[in-house]
Image: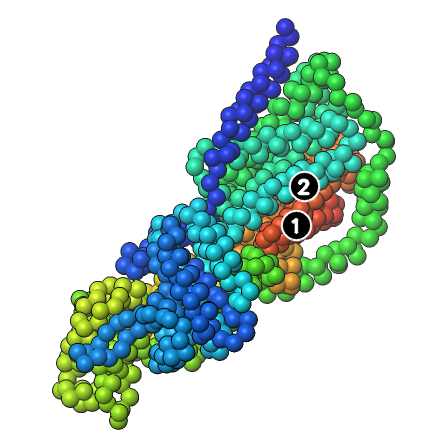
């Protein structure tokens, strides 16, 4: 048997075998979007969050809000329902604690001192019982208002704490159970809203699955149509598509085999592989017949396009790997696996496609091939572009300068934010629930201010307790975004009040601070008084202090009515500064919580964006400079990329598109994908320049050869990514639009800006020898 025939069959068999292996792995893929696993374990915010969980337990809180359609929630049917829901939710597997109007702790004075009992101990539905409940709620507004009941009394919250180590599957099970239970039981007289970070995690997974099921077939269809209208042949359509589908299976299968979880970012991977990976197949199919030496497998093909194709794959790989600089774990995963996918797509395109075409030319495979007319509309477009380029160079350059200036203005307006809730559409159920809870209660953005002393009992010191209490008032006063602050000091003040309930002359809802008022002589005695309160207290303070009797640390829980992360940063910094200026020596303040993790993610996005952009552009510059033995060549190579990236950020700023963990990928994708157009244009230009002195003729010849492949590639990738505008997530919609725009601008820069620069400057590295 012919040796080349055996080699072709061997290549096809090997690639199909690897594909089957990776395909079997795909069902094992795990989806995980918990923010705490996005942050590296060495990040201060992650360390603080983990330490807080060890002391204060689970921070996974699900908010169930109930709104009365008529009247208030302080009515017999609503209170009975709350009591029943509280009991039933407590029985759901995965739920650690439930707090509601019916079982929350209430501190009241007794002859012996104080007692702690549920707000609604026994409920028979009488008006007297409801009146007593209202009096209790009014007597401790600092704790209950905007926490368990709204200011207008028309809404209430049931706070559900999940187990600390609850998996995404367990969170989903709890959410589904509560959603069904509340929906069925509240129907008719209540509106229900369910929000909170566990709900966000669950719904992201649900929407991801929906996106993958809808969008992957959609992008395959779009790429099929683009390839068909570009090549008008079955082999031109099927072979590039088969190659990218195989590389996609390899990429996702490898993730599953290595137990790497799928995150929101991973939703882009199949789209990326299908849209981007088709480029190599397009170039192979486009040049095969005109370059292949008859009777050979690769002869002539690799000589003609091997180097530019390899450089394009290498620089694309580097563009994606530039994201590996980031400490954000899902972005690192995306970097490595997209780089693997590009490598796989390149290898499959230069091995699998020629092997199939070799068999076809030998008559072993029959694929009908439609002949392409000598002058297609696409080629006519390129010829027209060349004429305009030759006659209107000045106007084009002036227009480019105006675009650059506008983009610089837009760049200055770019906002960085990584709020997970804003990934959902504004009219989605979760956004409506979140908006209602922010409006009626303290808010769903939560972080803790943890105050630590240097020894057990340090948090009974009146000086630091007064500082904490005044800090809460300061946050309310200075920051309108603060919806609620619940602090360890609220309990101390309540204990102090009930222990002096017989006094009618002075207000004792305060931190004991003036010894004379309490018949004492020193602050040390006041400290002992606070310790006595804690000794008498029979409730549970584990959510607010590390020790029931001798707390070394205590915390304040801050809730924000904002969806974005900027207030978290501002308020956290203000709290640290306030503590430094007003707390006694020996005490430290730590910020921790889910919102603090999101805020840390926002800062990491900014830093990683600068590193990835700088490194990728630098490496692309180095590769092109080395290839052409000229630093000027490297500069010419990155100018089109810089132009496309600048426009991307300009558009983001002008249209208010936030820079987050997802949209941060666009710049690296612009480098990774857009550099292909520059490399292919430079290679073709240099090849034609060796044969012709007239630069206008050179440009026209480049348009007639590589220009076609560049246009098809840009169209295929751009339209493929544009499918993401139908995603459930706003960030993926943005990335779809931005990548499509970037393909337009980077191909424009390669086909218009680059030849203008080359024809005007006529650099030595590209001149005829």
Determine the secondary structure under disc 2.
helix
- Alpha-carbon span between mark 1 and mark 2: 10 Å
Please say if 276 is above or below 139. Answer: above
Q: Which label belongs to residue 726? A: 1
Taking depth in this image into account, of 608 and 212 the one nearest to the observer is 212
Number of numbered discs: 2
Residue 507 quadrant: bottom left
x 52%, y 76%: residue: 71
Any part of residue 486 in sight: no
Q: Is residue 244 left or right of residue 80?
A: right
Residue 305 percent location from the top left of the image: 67, 29
Determine the secondary structure under disc 1.
helix
Q: Which label belongs to residue 218? A: 2
Residue 268 quadrant: top right
Residue 495 percent location from the top left of the image: 25, 78
Q: Are marks 1 and 2 in contact (CB under 8 Å)?
A: yes
x 51%, y 28%: residue: 24
Taking depth in this image into account, of 356 and 27 the one nearest to the observer is 27
Please say if 285 is above or below 383. Answer: above
Mark 2 neighbour class, 10 Å CA radius: few under 14, some 14 to 19, many 20 or more: some
| Quarter of the image that includes the C terminus | top right
């Amino acid at each position: 048997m012919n040796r080349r025939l055996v080699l072709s069959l061997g290549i096809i068999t090997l690639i199909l075998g690897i594909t089957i292996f990776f395909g079997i792995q795909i069902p094992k893929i795990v989806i995980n979007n918990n923010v705490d696993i996005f942050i590296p374990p060495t990040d201060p915010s992650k360390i603080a969050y983990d330490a807080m969980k060890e002391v204060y337990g689970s921070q996974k809180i699900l908010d169930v809000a109930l709104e009365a359609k008529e009247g208030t929630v302080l009515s017999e049917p609503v209170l009975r329902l709350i009591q029943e829901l509280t009991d039933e939710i407590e029985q759901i597997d995965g739920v650690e604690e439930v707090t509601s109007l019916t079982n929350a702790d209430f501190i009241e004075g007794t002859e012996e001192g104080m007692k702690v009992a549920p707000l609604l101990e026994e409920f028979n539905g009488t008006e007297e019982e409801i009146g007593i409940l209202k009096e209790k709620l009014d007597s401790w507004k600092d704790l209950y208002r905007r926490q368990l009941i709204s200011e207008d009394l028309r809404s209430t919250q049931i706070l559900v704490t999940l187990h600390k180590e609850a998996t995404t599957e367990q969170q989903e099970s709890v959410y589904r159970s509560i959603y069904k239970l509340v929906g069925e039981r509240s129907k008719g007289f209540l509106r229900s809203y369910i929000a909170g970070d566990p709900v966000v995690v669950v719904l992201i997974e649900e929407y991801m699955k929906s996106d993958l099921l809808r969008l992957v077939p959609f992008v395959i269809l779009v790429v099929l149509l683009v390839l068909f209208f570009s090549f008008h042949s079955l082999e031109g359509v099927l072979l590039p598509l088969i190659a990218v589908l195989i590389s996609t299976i390899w990429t996702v299968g490898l993730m599953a085999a290595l137990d790497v979880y799928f995150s929101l970012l991973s939703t882009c991977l199949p789209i990326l592989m299908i849209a981007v990976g088709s480029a190599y197949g397009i170039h192979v199919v486009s040049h095969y017949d005109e370059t292949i030496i008859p009777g050979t497998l690769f002869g002539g093909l690799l000589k003609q396009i091997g180097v530019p194709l390899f450089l394009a794959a290498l620089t694309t790989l580097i563009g994606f790997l530039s994201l590996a600089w980031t400490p954000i774990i899902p972005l690192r995963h995306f970097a490595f696996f997209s780089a693997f996918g590009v490598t796989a797509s390149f290898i499959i395109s230069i091995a699998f496609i020629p092997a199939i075409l070799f068999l076809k030319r030998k008559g072993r495979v029959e694929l009908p091939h439609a002949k392409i007319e000598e002058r297609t509309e696409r080629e006519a477009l390129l010829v027209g572009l060349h004429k305009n380029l030759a006659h209107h160079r000045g106007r084009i350059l002036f227009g480019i300068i105006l675009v650059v200036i506008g983009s610089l203005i837009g760049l200055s307006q770019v906002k960085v934010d990584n709020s997970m809730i804003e990934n959902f559409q504004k009219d989605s159920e979760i956004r409506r629930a979140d908006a209602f809870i922010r409006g009626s209660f303290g808010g769903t953005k939560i972080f803790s201010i943890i105050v630590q002393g240097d020894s057990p009992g340090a948090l009974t010191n009146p000086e630091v307790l007064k500082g904490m209490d005044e800090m809460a008032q300061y946050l309310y006063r200075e920051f309108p975004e603060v919806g609620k602050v619940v602090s360890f000091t609220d309990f101390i003040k309540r204990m102090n009040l009930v222990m002096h309930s017989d006094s009618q002359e002075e207000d004792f809802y305060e931190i004991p601070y003036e010894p004379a008022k309490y018949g004492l002589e020193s602050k040390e005695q006041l400290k002992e008084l606070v310790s006595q309160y804690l000794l008498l207290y029979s409730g549970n303070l584990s959510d607010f202090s590390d020790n029931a009797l001798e707390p070394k640390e205590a915390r304040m829980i801050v809730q924000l009515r904002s969806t974005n992360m900027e207030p978290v940063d501002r308020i956290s910094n203000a709290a640290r500064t306030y503590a430094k200026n007003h707390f006694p020596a020996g005490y430290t303040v730590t910020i921790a919580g889910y919102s603090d993790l999101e805020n840390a993610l926002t800062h990491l996005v900014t830093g990683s964006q600068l590193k990835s952009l700088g490194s990728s552009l630098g490496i692309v510059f180095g590769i092109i400079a080395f290839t052409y033995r000229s630093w000027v060549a490297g500069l010419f190579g990155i100018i089109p990329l810089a132009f496309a990236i600048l426009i991307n950020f300009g558009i983001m700023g002008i249209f208010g598109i936030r820079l987050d963990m997802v949209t941060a990928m666009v710049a690296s994708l612009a480098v990774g994908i857009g550099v292909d157009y520059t490399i292919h244009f430079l290679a073709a230009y240099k090849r034609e320049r060796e044969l012709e002195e007239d630069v206008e003729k050179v440009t026209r010849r480049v348009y007639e050869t590589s220009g076609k492949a560049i246009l098809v590639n840009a169209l295929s990738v751009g339209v493929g990514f544009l499918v993401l505008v139908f995603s459930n997530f706003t960030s993926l919609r943005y990335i779809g639009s931005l990548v499509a725009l970037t393909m337009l601008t980077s191909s424009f820069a390669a086909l218009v800006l680059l030849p203008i620069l080359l024809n005007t400057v006529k650099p030595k590295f590209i001149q005829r020898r």
